[in-house]
Every structure is written in structure tokens, then in C-alpha cells.
Image (cartoon, helix red, strand yellow):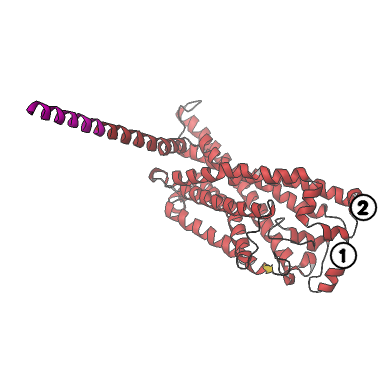
Amino acid sequence: MISCRLLSDARCAVTMTSTMAIDFNSSSSSTSNLTADFINKYTESELYERFKPAISTVDKYVTPFWYVIGFPGNILAFVVWIRRRMRHSSGCYLAALAIADFLFLILQLLYELQNSWDVRILEVNVICQLFPILFYALQYLSPLLVLGFTVERHISICHPFQRERFCTTSRAVKVTAGLVLFSLSLHLIQGYFWVFNPEHGACMPRPSVMQGGERSLWSIWSWITELLVFGFVPVVTLVLNVFVIREAKKLSDSEEKRLCLKKKSKSSAPSATTVMLLAVSFYLIFTTLPVTICYVMYLTFPPGSWEITEREFVADPVWRRHLRFHAARMIIQELCMSHYACNIIIYIITGKQFRSELRQLLFSGRRMTSRWNNDFSNVQTKDNNLTTDTSNGAMTHV
């Protein structure tokens, strides 16, 4: 029986309602429409695994690579950004970004175990409703936080007289908290959308929210939120970055003229921070917009009819186009998921102060351990010498 299992295809239910227009209110109608051998033989995930095994392999073995980088990387980034010398306003946003990405990767790991490895750990009542709320809230929080520090950097560079008012650590903390609450409130409705179906033993979209196909509550809400956060937000971030780069270049040129220098001997800390933040922003833009484009294009490459045999499926041109598109989309999604894991690489490459703090964090522990071992060895040596002296004294006295 085909079903949209818990987040099994990001928005699989949207495309199902758009292309199949199944009426979930009439169970008898659904049953009669889904009686073909082909439908009864495969679920959606099993279908892709059967006819596009290479993509299934990529999904299983590429994603863990991001976990290997992302779990330690985000923890290290968070610890560095909360150190005393890094607690500026931009550091608040980046610390929140690190912890949000870390938590999202944990939920993504559970999602992969559920859908790629068939470890059924999420198909439980309550978890079925709670997991989508947290999963989507953390997924959406990343571009929102990037927009937050991009706006702050725009104010700092393009409106310097407003810097002391808007670019403070306390305001950054408040904005971050507001973005977290906004992302959570935006996805509280997911707790209503999803329901555990004991008959199928699966977490599925509530039938009532699927009614109406493309005009269903589910479809409309999903399109609005997806295009808002993964379409509009990256575009706004891109525009603000262009303004920041243009204004920074003007400031650099005017400073060169004022000092009568062709080249500055040493870059300032604010400009270095700006370069790092711009790199993070552009990286998120380039890894977010392609996924959004694929999402919008999905309806251009819809699945074919399910009322066919397996032999007809293999030769069906609609299904073949859909499978090719699905393969390309999965590769793009896997590559673009890297922005939840690889920010620390950008920090190390572009952030001199970050590298310095990270070096101190990593090697100060080694120095303390080495110093402790040396002190312990010295104490042990002194104890041995004292024992030897005592023994010699006792022997002389005798």
C-alpha cells in the first residue's frame, strides 16, 4: 500500500495530492483505486530503491559523511563562539547556528534510520506529532539565523550610525530568541498535520488536511512556508550581501585614498569578520536555492499512473522522466545538506580569530595534561628520593 510515511519524501504528500488527487475520506474509493499489483507490491521508498538503487546507496552512505563532520564540527564551533573573547553580536548568531545545526543533524540521523535503514523508531503516537515540529523548526531556523546576522552586518556596514543601537550582543540574543520562537510557532501546525495510523503502523498526514489536492490545507501551507524560508529568505540575504559588499568596497577605496596607500598592510578585525559572515551567507544561499528550485519543479516531473503492471512501469515515459528527476534531486539534496555540517570549515578558512581561539581550545588541554603529567612525575620522583634517603638513614643508624 502506498503511503507517505513520516517525512519520507520531505513533502511527498503534497505531490501525491497534486498528482494523484486521492480522496482520503472514502476508504472504499481509495481501496478500489489502489488494487493494482504494482501498488500493492511497493511503497514509495521501496519503489525508488528497487528501480534507482544507486540513489538509495548515495542516500545511505553519503549522509553519514556529513554526520562525521557536523557532529564534532558544530560542537567545536559552539564552544568557540561562547568563549569570552568571541561573545560579540555576530558570535551569538553563529553560536545559535551551530547548536541548531547540531540538533537538526541528530533529528536527521533519526530520520535516516527510519527511512533509509528501515529502523522504525519514530512511528509511535506523540513522537509522530512531535518529531515533525522539531524537525522542520530546526531545519528552517538555519536560514533565519543567517538572515539575522546578515541584516546586522548590513546595518553595521551600510548604516554605521545605527551600529551602537542595533548591533549589540543583548539585541542579538533577543533576535535569536525571537527567531527560535518564530520557527517553532510556524511549525506547531505540523503536530496537527501528522497522525499515527495504527492500521498501517505508520505516521501519516491527517486525511482531512489532504482534501482538495493542490488546494488542500497541507499543500497551501507547505508551499507558503517552503517558498518563504527557502526561497524568499535566501534571496533577501543575497540582496543584502550585495549591498554590504558594495558599501565595504566604497569604504575600502575611500580609506586607501585618504591614507594615500595602494594596499593596506593589515586587514582590520571587522573586515575579517565581514568576510567570514559573507562566506557563511553565500554558502547557505548556494546550498538552499537549488533544493527550492527542485521542490518547485517537482510538479513538472510528476509520478506516472500507479494503475499499471511492473513491465508497463519500466517502459512508461512519465515514470522514466520522474525517476531521472528524482535521482538528480536526491543528489542535489545530499550535497546541499552540507551547510548543516560544514560551517566550521568556513570559520577555519576565513576567520583568523576563530582559528586562534580554536587552537587555544584544542591545545591548551594538551598543555594542561602534559603539565599535570610532569608535575605528577616530579612528585613521584621526590617521593622516591625521600624514601631512599630515609632508608639510607635508617641503615646508617643501625
The residue sitting at 66% across, 57% down in the picture is 228
- Residue 388 on the magenta span: yes
**Label 1 packing within 10 angstroms: few (<14), some (14-19), many (20+):** few
| Percent coordinates x, y for residue 392 in the rendering | 14, 27
Q: Which residue is mark 2?
A: 312
| Whether residue 243 is visible | no
Q: Secondary structure at mark 2?
A: helix
| Whether residue 73 is visible | yes
Q: Which residue is mark 1?
A: 35
Taking 83 as reference, is 191 above or below it?
A: below
The residue closer to the viewer here, 5 or 145, is 5
| Percent coordinates x, y for residue 337 in the rendering | 64, 46
- Name the chief secondary structure element in magenta: helix
Taking 193 as reference, is 9 above or below it?
A: above
| Percent coordinates x, y for residue 4 in the rendering | 74, 61
The residue sitting at 40% across, 45% down in the picture is 83
What's the amino acid at mark 2? Glu
Which mark is on residue 50? none
**Where is residue 370, by image quadrant?**
top left
The residue closer to the viewer here, 233 or 127, is 127
Q: Secondary structure at mark 1?
A: loop
**Label 2 packing within 10 angstroms: few (<14), some (14-19), many (20+):** few
The residue sitting at 44% across, 43% down in the picture is 80
| Percent coordinates x, y for residue 334 in the rendering | 68, 45
What are the residue bounds of the magenta stretch?
379-398
| Quarter of the figure that contains the C terminus | top left
Taking 47 as reference, is 128 above or below it?
A: below
